[in-house]
């Protein structure tokens, strides 16, 4: 057993829009492939589109989070809500334009076919029209 006291880091602009702080809470050690992070989004901040080969669970800890899918479906989740993104579903998540949001992001890495593991494949940014439409849902 060990105590983990991680420091938050600014998330990269290559995969996030706006101010996002990520605190890694757990990274699995073989044979575990579990990853858990606490992710905090400033108003208007969001991830880019992405997909998790084995799915992802988002447990909202503060504020109001938006989770959108390619078919235009949007979930508005509040503190205490849990959103399950199934394996292979392209999605994004973040804060509303006027409220901070924070969630625990829980996922498992899959074998990447090259001797390593990958928990996520990042895609393009969420465009402003898609984000604006999510606000109205």
Image (spheres, helix red, strand yellow):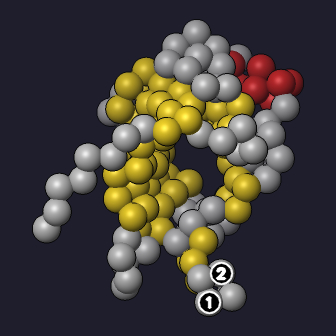
Identify the residue at horizontal 83%, vertical 47% (top origin). Answer: 124
Identify the residue at horizontal 33%, vertical 46% (top origin). Answer: 6
Q: Is residue 16 left or right of 31 when viewed as pictured?
A: right
Residue 18, quarter of the rendered image: top right
The residue that label 1 is drawn on is 115
Badge 2 local density, few (<14 within 10 Å), some, or many (20+)? few
Give the answer, above or below, for where 118 lies relative to 115. above
Give the answer, above or below, for where 44 lies relative to 90. above
Q: Nearer the viewer, residue 125 or 27?
A: 27
Q: Tell me if residue 71 can be seen.
A: no
Q: Quadrant of the C terminus?
A: top right
Q: Position of residue 130 (x, y in %)?
A: 81, 30
Q: Position of residue 2 (x, y in %)?
A: 16, 63
Q: Quadrant of the N terminus?
A: bottom left
Q: Position of residue 27 (x, y in %)?
A: 39, 64
Give the answer, above or below, for where 37 lies relative to 95. below
Direction top: furthest residue: 98
Q: Which mark is residue 11?
A: none
Q: Is residue 85 left or right of 16 when viewed as pictured?
A: left
Q: Nearer the viewer, residue 20 or 64?
A: 20
Kindly report the distance in space between the C-alpha atoms of the residues bearing marks 2 and 1: 7 Å
Residue 126, quarter of the rendered image: top right
Identify the residue at horizontal 65%, vertical 32% (top origin). Answer: 46
Q: Do the residues bearing badges 2 and 1 touch, measured as CB atoms within 8 Å?
A: yes
Q: Position of residue 19 (x, y in %)?
A: 61, 25
The residue that label 2 is drawn on is 112
Q: Tell me if residue 84 can be seen.
A: yes
Q: Secondary structure at mark 2?
A: loop
């Amino acid at each position: 057993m060990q105590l983990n006291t991680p420091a938050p880091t600014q998330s990269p602009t290559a995969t996030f829009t706006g101010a996002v702080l990520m605190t890694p809470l757990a990274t699995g050690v073989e044979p575990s492939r579990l990853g858990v992070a606490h992710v905090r989004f400033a108003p208007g901040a969001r991830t880019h589109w992405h997909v998790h080969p084995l799915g992802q669970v988002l447990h909202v800890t503060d504020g109001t989070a938006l989770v959108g899918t390619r078919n235009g479906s949007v979930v508005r989740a509040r503190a205490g809500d849990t959103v399950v993104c199934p394996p292979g579903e392209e999605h994004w998540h973040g804060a509303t334009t006027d409220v901070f949001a924070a969630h625990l992001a829980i996922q498992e890495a899959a074998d990447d076919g090259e001797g390593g593991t990958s928990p996520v494949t990042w895609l393009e940014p969420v465009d402003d029209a898609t984000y604006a439409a999510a606000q109205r849902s």
